[in-house]
Image: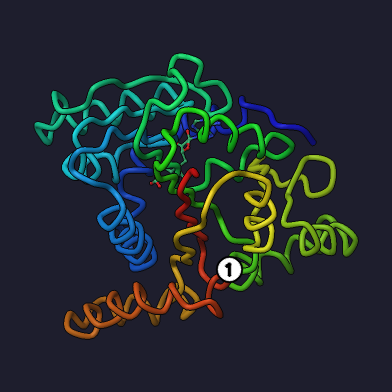
Amino acid sequence: MSYNPEIPKNRYDNYGDREWTRLEKDGHGELLYHVHFDILKRYINENDKVLEIGAGSGRYTKDIVKMCNELTVGDISSHQIEFNKSKMKELSLFDKIKLFCVLDVLDMGIFEDSSFDCVVCIGGVINYLLDKEKDGINEMLRVLKPGGTLIVGAMSFIGASLYYLDGIRYEKDQFGLEATKWVFNTGIQDEEHYPVPSKHYVHMMRSSEMDALFADYPITIKERSSAGLFTQAGDSALENARQDKEFWKLIIEKEIAFTKMQGTLDCGMNIIYVLEKN
Ligand SMILES: C[S@@+](CC[C@H](N)C(=O)[O-])C[C@H]1O[C@@H](n2cnc3c(N)ncnc32)[C@H](O)[C@@H]1O
């Protein structure tokens, strides 16, 4: 199956405020938020010109804008861009953002080469690109200055398969064992092999695939992290942990620390790579 921009566009145009509440409505969302926030804070500098692509409703926009000198916000979904704008207005941050644009990461021709010190693309944009993954990386590296930082996050296949095991077993009865083997072997749920009714057609990644994806580029990998590692404890254990404030504070600290360990890289719900363009 090849990349179809209508799939992410339709999905996120019909998302309501789910994207805004996603990172605070439960423990899983909070874990993701804290790991990403910690990485953004450590790599974005106050003088940086930053592009946030696939920004969604702005959960990280509101933070990134305070970390840098100039922020451009892009997303394929006009709904998400409008939502992001209204949230930034509500938070009195709107005027601090240079530009909001509806655009596909595969075609960022409105930006010249080497325009940004940092490009942030987190929350799974690259999972939708399928046969165009390398084109997406090319385009992000093109608009990045030499010496600049690219922060890319993807949904993790192994993490998702641990968390959603029962769903995968249920889907085996619908699509058959061969389809289940396909998804385990490739991480790809697509129309041809794994036709989920939601039409959420994505390539969920392994870290080995992220390594292969970046292997041919003139980049240096600065950091690899998982995110949403304690999510594997299950919803009720996580919610109990969250109700115990001092315990939850400790879990957030440990989430940030443990997600940097090589052995956990594929086990969280997301995988984040921080790269420097040589
Ligand atoms: C799960 S949301 C993540 C939002 C935010 N970055 C976060 O981590 O909370 C994914 C976002 O990527 C956008 N997106 C998906 N494919 C894209 C593409 N090819 N180009 C630009 N944005 C895209 C979607 O519209 C959606 O807003």
Q: Position of residue 214 (x, y in %)?
A: 62, 49
- Residue at horizontal 51%, vertical 16%? 109
Residue occupying the far left of the picture: 92
Q: Position of residue 92 (x, y in %)?
A: 9, 31
Viewer-side residue, 199 vs 53: 53
Q: Quadrant of the N terminus?
A: top right
Viewer-side residue, 135 vs 90: 135
- Residue at horizontal 66%, vertical 49%? 213
Relative side of 202 to 20, left or right = right
The scheme the figure's colours follow is rainbow
Asked which quadrant contains residue 118, the reply is top left
The crowding category of the residue bearing disc 1, from other C-alpha atoms within 10 Å (few below 14, some 14 to 19, many at least 20), is many
- Residue at horizontal 50%, vertical 60%? 270
In this rendering, the answer to whether 151 lies above or below 223 is above
Establish whether ligand 1 lies closer than 8 Å to the Cβ of label 1: no
Residue occupying the far right of the picture: 178
Relative side of 174 to 204, left or right = right
Q: Position of residue 31 (x, y in %)?
A: 35, 66
Amino acid type of the residue tagged 1 in the rendering: Gly
- Residue at horizontal 22%, vertical 30%? 70
- Counting the numbered discs, the total is 1
SS for tag 1? Answer: helix
Q: Position of residue 152 (x, y in %)?
A: 48, 48
Asked which quadrant contains residue 72, the reply is top left
Viewer-side residue, 232 vs 128: 128
Relative side of 163 to 194, left or right = left
Which residue does the numbered mark 1 point to in the structure image? 159
Asked which quadrant contains residue 53, the reply is top left
